[in-house]
Amino acid sequence: MKVYTKKDYDYRQTVLENIKNVEPLFQTDKVIEFNQPFSYKGRNYMSCMHDPENDILIVESFELKEIPEYDYQYSDEIMCPYCGDLQCDSWESDEIGKEQCDICGGTFEYSREVTVSYCSTKLEYPQITLIE
């Protein structure tokens, strides 16, 4: 199996012309499970696409990070607490749930926090009677 990085291969096109002159990241006889993170030469990777007919796997690198709790606990989108990937369609998620990150494969729970704020607008200045 030849393994290429996502940047070297436009995986939306299934034309092999994309990688004709590109050296693979590596080549292996080992079975790499699709959607299973793995490490190669000190870097972490997750598969994006598998072309079994041509024995090609396209991967994207990711980093596991020490993310401060306040960064992932109170963000505008659901954030993976392991790699920092943002789920841009968080509004479609349930109020409370469990997710598996598409990038690093880590699992985590999330909950939606809702805050209410109010805005006031002046309509009529108060009438104050002067008494002398």
Image (cartoon, rainbow, N blue to C red):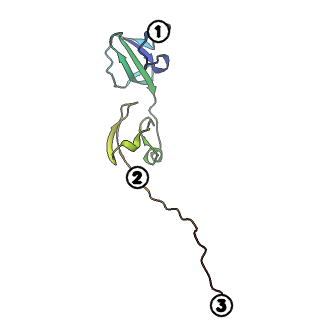
Establish if 130 lies above or below 59: below
Q: Which mark is residue 131?
A: 3
Q: Residue 17 versus residue 41: which sits nearer the camera?
A: 17
Mark 1 residue type: Glu
At mark 3, the secondary structure is loop
Find residue 28 and report its image quarter: top left
Q: Residue 77 versus residue 59: which sits nearer the camera?
A: 77
| Residue found at x 46% / y 20% | 6
Mark 1 or 2: the one toward you: 1
Residue 65 left/right relative to 54: right
Establish if 101 lies above or below 29: below
Quarter of the figure that contains the N terminus: top left
Q: Which mark is residue 17?
A: 1
**Between marks 1 and 2, how big is the CA–CA gap?**
47 Å
**Between marks 2 and 3, how big is the CA–CA gap?**
51 Å
> Residue furthest toward the top?
21
Find residue 93 and report its image quarter: top left
